[in-house]
Image (tube, rainbow, N blue to C red):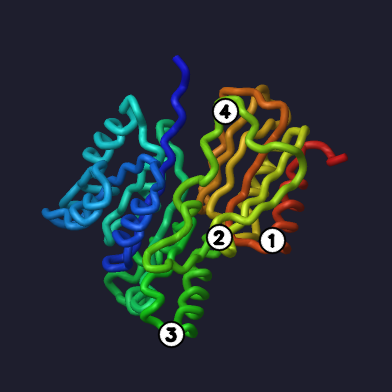
Amino acid sequence: MTARAPVPLAVVGGYLGAGKTTLLNRLLANAEGRRITVLVNDFGEINIDAALIRARSDDVIQLENGCICCSIGGRLADALLEIAGRPQRPDLLVIEASGVSDPQRIAQIGLLDPAFRLNGVVVAVDVAGVRDSLQDPLVGDMVRRQIAGASAVVLTKADLAAPEDQAAVARLVGDLAPRATVLTADHGEVPWTVFADVAPHMAPGAPLLRGGGWQSASALHAGIRTLSYQTDLAFDKPRLRQALKGLPVRLLRAKGVVRLAGEDGAHEVHLVGGRLRISRWEEAPQRSSLVFIGAFGDEGETAVRAMVDEAVAWAVN
């Protein structure tokens, strides 16, 4: 049997009232024919969020009355098994965590279950209310954990705050999540690249990139760019891990298929929110290819290039 491509997975988190449902409804409104399944958890017996999202999508699975990462874990697993077993899998699975749960724990699914691939942990932050939430002795630590585990922090309700307050909150969340991309939503809208890839899915065995060497391109949102790297050489696995874990730029994610020195075949690489996975790849491409998506300028691009070059197993000609 031919292995099925994993389902791209994005986890959406954020404290109560941060604007998660608005983000999801805007995502669904801009789906452009993509099949999106939404799994919604609400902390209570009546799942209000699911009802609000169902107005935009006919593929909503609701889990009520508990934190999605603890008390309803069995029902979450059942829902994921059902999605993975569908004859036609969705193009994207979005899990909306309740406002009182930790999206990092849910994100582990994308690293442990081969049927899914973690594409992002998107955390909504209410510009007007986040500082009060962080200072609250009851919920402050939880809100801090939510932000720290994000691959993308989306500032919401920015139109209700003065420009200087917006800038101050951006600096604050940037300190809490130093490797996350920080974006400001426009009435709940953010670029598709925050959740999944814009480019068509890669066919098995197809090259990730065309051409060679380093390439960069602007994405669909100001401040987000893609950077690609190819080499005919193999990487030293420990040095590659060290380089990817220490990149000095804000990334949404990095991915690729690489050859590793001393190991047969190829390996798949995924990096999201500081979570790195390197696993065997079924095909055997001739070149190592990596793609980086995030918010960085020319200096950041140069730094990424230098660190990845250092991970090549032999000197670059």
**Viewer-nearest of discs 3 and 1:** 3
Query: Is residue 256 in sight in this rendering?
Result: yes
Q: Quadrant of residue 35?
A: top left
The residue beneath circle 1 is: 300
Which of the marked residues, 4 or 3, is nearer the chain's N terminus?
3
Mark 2 to mark 1 CA distance (whole Å): 12 Å
State the residue position of label 3. Answer: 162
Residue 263, position as x, y percentages in the image: 68, 26
Categorize mark 3 by other alpha carbons within 10 Å: few (<14), some (14-19), many (20+): few
Task: Verify CB contact (< 8 Å) between mark 3 and mark 1.
Answer: no
Do the numbered discs 4 and 3 sit on residues whose CB atoms are within 8 Å?
A: no
Q: Which mark is residue 17?
A: none
- The spot of residue 184 in percent (x, y) is 46, 69
Mark 3 vs 1, N-terminal side: 3
Residue 44 versus residue 207 in the image, above or below: below
Q: CA distance from mark 2 to mark 4?
A: 26 Å
CA separation, marks 2 and 3?
A: 25 Å
Q: Nearer the viewer, residue 118 or 307?
A: 118
Which numbered dot is residue 179?
Answer: 2
Along the polypeptide, which appears first: circle 2 or circle 4? 2
